[in-house]
Image (tube, rainbow, N blue to C red):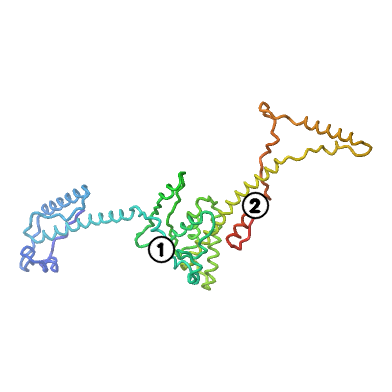
Amino acid sequence: MFVLPPPPTSTKQALPGLLSKRKGPELAPVPEDHEFVNAPPEFASRARDEIHKRLLKGKKKGVTPAAPSIAHSRSRDSDSVSLATISTAGSSLFSSRASTTASYIDYIEAPKTIHLQDALPKTFYDMYSSDLLLDPQNLLCNGRPKFTKRELLDWDLNDIRSLLVVEQFRPEWGAQLPLVEFDTSSITSSSSTKTPVPQFRLQLLPLNSTDDFIIRTLVESDLYLEANLDYEFKLTSAKYTVAAARKRHHQYLGREESIMNLSKPEWRNIIENYLLNIAVEAQCRFDFKRHCADYKKWKQQQALVKKPDMPPPSTIPSRKRESLLKRTLLRNTAMLSSEDNIPIASPNNPTTTNPAAPSKISLTKDEKAMLWSQCQSRVYQRLGLDWAPDGI
């Protein structure tokens, strides 16, 4: 609703600071001996309605209305000042709405898309302590320490995923994390079979995050997504990793912090320790399944080994007062009677079982525990870890 300003009640200049700076005969200061004359109410209402109509018409067309131009000029300066005030207020009202809408559209625009090579960090000198980087013999060709390269299942893939966890936004990203685009032409062209495309995404983990946020970020990451590790194991590994990092941080500072303000090497160490824990678990589970299958095959082969046919001990005659011929006849009689009791396997008799096909082979709990401990020991020894095997 547009409201006209109150009519002037004095004979002094209206807006003297504004009108005194203007030039031209139309807006010259009014002398003191001249009185202002108010326009009739119907003219003021007509001008107001006309301005209102034009503003609403421009809004319906989707165009931001500009300040309406007044075609007819007034002979009194009071009418010009009133109309200018009204038009300025109307223009400001709709202009503010348009700017608000534009800012809202900018806020919800789709995130950017960048290539995987552009998302990965170019340097790693700030992720590790200086004593690790001073010895060139302990560094890989990319400038990272040698312990970042492990002979584990899908290590390279998940090591790249761990490098996509960032501590802050880059200036070119704006206010949200971009999507990571991966070129799949090298995968699909190298093999005729359909290869699953790995997933890559950026994750934000600030240096001053709470323990719960660090744990949740690690558990919800894509690290070893293909291994299908259970949630409870990942949660336990993340809690253990963060607790160990908090203990080292407390020893380094000499005081306890409710929220750890991590350095960049401490921050990276948490990510790599969690990655190593779940990578070793994934490797042990993979080896355990393979060893169980091999052990079942060995048990099945042992069951198929034909044992020598021996009569039961009760049918074996004693050697007292009996000749060799009599003992041989008794032994042959016992063997023939045992062969007659064996059912003949035929395709028309489904109830008969083939003696050469043993029942389903299964492993006992002790056998599984033995195989799991062996798998863990071999993986730990191969990686040079002083970890102790745990129970299955």
Q: What kind of element bears circle 2? A: helix
Mark count: 2
Mark drawn on residue 69:
none
> Image height check: is 262 above or below 63?
below
**Camera-nearest residue between 75 and 24:** 24
Question: Of the residues shown, which amino acid type is indicated by label 2?
Answer: Leu
Residue 193: percent from left, percent from top: 47, 44
Question: Of the residues shown, which amino acid type is indicated by label 1?
Answer: Lys
Q: Which residue is farthest front?
A: 325
**Camera-nearest residue between 247 and 184:** 184
Q: Quadrant of residue 325?
A: top right
Distance between mark 1 and mark 2 Cα atoms: 43 Å
Residue 215: percent from left, percent from top: 50, 59
Q: Which residue is mark 2?
A: 371
Q: Is residue 192 left or right of residue 296?
A: left
Q: Which residue is farthest bottom?
A: 254
> Image height check: is 92 above or below 253?
above
Q: What kind of element bears circle 1? A: loop
Residue 316: percent from left, percent from top: 86, 37
Q: Is residue 59 left or right of residue 179?
A: left
Q: Which residue is mark 1?
A: 122
